[in-house]
Image (cartoon, coloured by chain):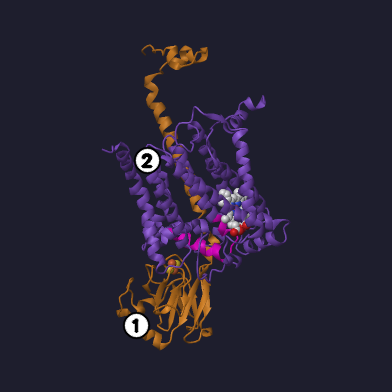
Chain colours: A orange, B purple
Amino acid sequence: METPDYVTPLETGYKDDYHNAPHFNTRGDPTKRAFTYLVLGSSKFIAASAARVLILKLIYTMSASADVLAKGSVEVELGSIPLGESATIKWRGKPVFIRHRTPDEITLAAKDDQAELRDPQLDSERSVKPEWLVLLGVCTHLGCVPIANAGDYHGWFCPCHGSHYDVSGRIRKGPAPLNLEVPTYSFIEDDTKLLLGGETQR
Amino acid sequence: MRLIKKPLFNIVNNHLIDYPTPINIHYAWNFGFLSAMCLIIQIVTGIFLAMHYTPHVDLAFISVEHIMRDVNFGWLLRYIHANGASMFFIVVYIHIFRGLYYGSYAAPRQFVWVIGVIILLLMIITAFIGYVLPWGQMSLWGATVITNLVSAVPLVGDSIVAWLWGGFSVDNATLNRFFSLHYLLPFVIAAASLVHLAALHQEGSGNPLGIDASSDKVPMYPYFIVKDLLGIVAFIIFFSFFVYFSPNLLGHPDNYIEANPMVTPAHIVPEWYFLPFYAILRSIPHKLGGVICMIFAIVVLALLPWIHSTEIRSSRFRPIYRGLYWSMAACCLILGWIGGMPVEDPYIIIGQIASVYYFLYFLVILPLLGSLEKFLLSYKIN
Ligand code: HEM
Ligand code: FES
């Protein structure tokens, strides 16, 4: 082993004996460096992954909790909604519009399939049974609740920034980019009830 | 007097007692001190409000009513806190406009200015979140519209919004985390304010002449502490007018209706201090573009020390800038007015012109003005 070279006291910047004692100033044994770097490098890696786990877990705690997710489905009695009326049901903290459409409305909706649409979709794609239109009552612009039977297209009108939706809940005018969303739902108990959430069955 | 020279205590001495202050600073320089007082008022009233407030969707609204009706002097506590937020913004906006007029953003005080803009951003978030806590109709729908802005982010926007809410809509999880953050952020602001002050005292305060003042300074105490206290008295009189005589003037009546996720109020307006930014958001006919412009309207302030082009700080010696400065002040007032109006003509077009002018002023006019001034200064008649 070669003789260790010493750093002159001036270079350390300290004047006391401890910092200037020979053991403090030796450059160390170069043959041991690989091992030192291995230990240092892997410790840094472990520390970094611990930090990563900590941050990720903290972020995850803020996502929807199990009880919130569990409120996923709701049953609605359809008999209580007369023809031409709509009901607003609370589902996952949001309003859902269930509209019992008249034959006139269904014809109008089908006719509007031909109109110029911002988010093109056929009325038939938006309902399982044409007489029941089920929509999430959340404006696709910034989330307000649109008002029923209002606006230029006989559908819904959002008062917040003026979006107009047609009888099929499709966006026709105003700042909203997309049609009112159709949630997943299915008809149960001989079509007397509607189950919000779960899978859509056609 | 001995103790004050000891470590730790001498921080107070160096920054508030013996701090060398330019002799010529006038009342526009009171607003920094006033901002600090506003922060303290908000923190103290907030801590006492939190002793009676319940962050739960079923109880939040009732607990605020309980504060108003049952808690001893609860009405006073709440009215001070609610109006205190408005006062805080009035004071800080004046403080910022003081900086714009006297070139306080210019070297060597760039970092003081940037930290100031960060404090403004934190204040905006804190006040927005605080407004959600009473869980009235404006609380819920304001929160819904503003958090939905994030959904404009391409691809991941919707997932981020759901994460922010902790559910499918602004609901109990959201209210709870907002309360937690509303308690935390003011202390972050306090820390940022200390950094703001330390950065300022590193270089020394500016003054209305915009020139180096090192040759003419006096100690902060008694001269300017006394002057600041006089300012506080005037401020408290102004503040008290709102708290005691018109406590709901700056608020919105719909926030006395409990939040209802099934019905949106006909007009959603944010608190008055957000109106100029809200106007910019609504003037851009594109969801993501609007959000970007609104955020950039604040961030552009932070760029000012690097995009302005003059070596003269104070407007006293910049006649052209002085005129433009007032046009900017008018522009902000117009934007504030538009922000409270429905989205129809002629408000849409006025808002769009004002928004364009706002950015033109900071991004084009100010960077070019310096060269014009330099040319005019060296221009010799004959
Ligand atoms: C930067 C300082 C602060 C600002 C700008 C601010 C702003 C606001 C605003 C605008 C409201 C809504 C007032 C209303 O209409 O009722 C509010 C409510 C509230 N704040 Fe703060 N706040 C600040 C600091 C604090 C602190 C430090 C606490 C301590 C926990 C606090 C606790 C509360 C509570 C409990 C409420 C709900 C009660 C109520 O609505 O009156 N605030 N805050
Ligand atoms: S939220 Fe419906 S138009 Fe903006």
Confirm whether circles 2 and 1 share one chain.
no
Query: Which secondary structure, mark 2?
Result: helix
Task: Give, as a three-letter code, the residue at label 1.
Answer: Ala
Assign ligand 2 to one image quadrant: bottom left
Q: What label sits on residue B220 in the rendered view?
A: none
Q: Is residue B346 visible?
A: yes
Q: Is residue B135 magenta?
A: yes
**What main secondary structure does the magenta stretch of the protein show?**
helix
Q: Is residue B303 visible?
A: no
* Rendered location of residue A33, percent (x, y): 38, 24
In this rendering, the answer to whether B197 lies above or below B47 is above
| Circle 1 residues within 10 Å: few <14, some 14–19, many ≥20 | some
- The residue at 58%/66% (across/down) is B253
Count residues near mark 2 (Cα–Cα under 10 Å), then give few for <14, some for 14-19, many for 20+: few
Where the N terminus of chain A falls, by quadrant?
top left
Q: Chain of mark 1?
A: A
Whole-percent x, y for residue B169 in the image: 50, 64
Specify whether residue A140 is painted magenta: no
Instruction: Residue A168: give x, y in percent of width and height.
Output: 39, 78
* Residue at image coords 57%, 41%: B33
Q: Is residue B281 left or right of residue A58?
A: left
Name the residue tied to disc 1: A110
A40 or B29, which is in the foreground?
A: B29
x and y percentages locating residue A127 in the rendered image: 40, 78
Do the residues under discs 2 and 1 have CB atoms within 8 angstroms?
no
Q: Which residue is mark 2?
A: B306
Judging from the image, mark 2 belongs to the subunit labelled B
Residue at position x 63%, y 59% in the image:
B247
Give the residues drawn in magenta, as a range.
Answer: B129-149
Secondary structure at numbered mark 1: helix
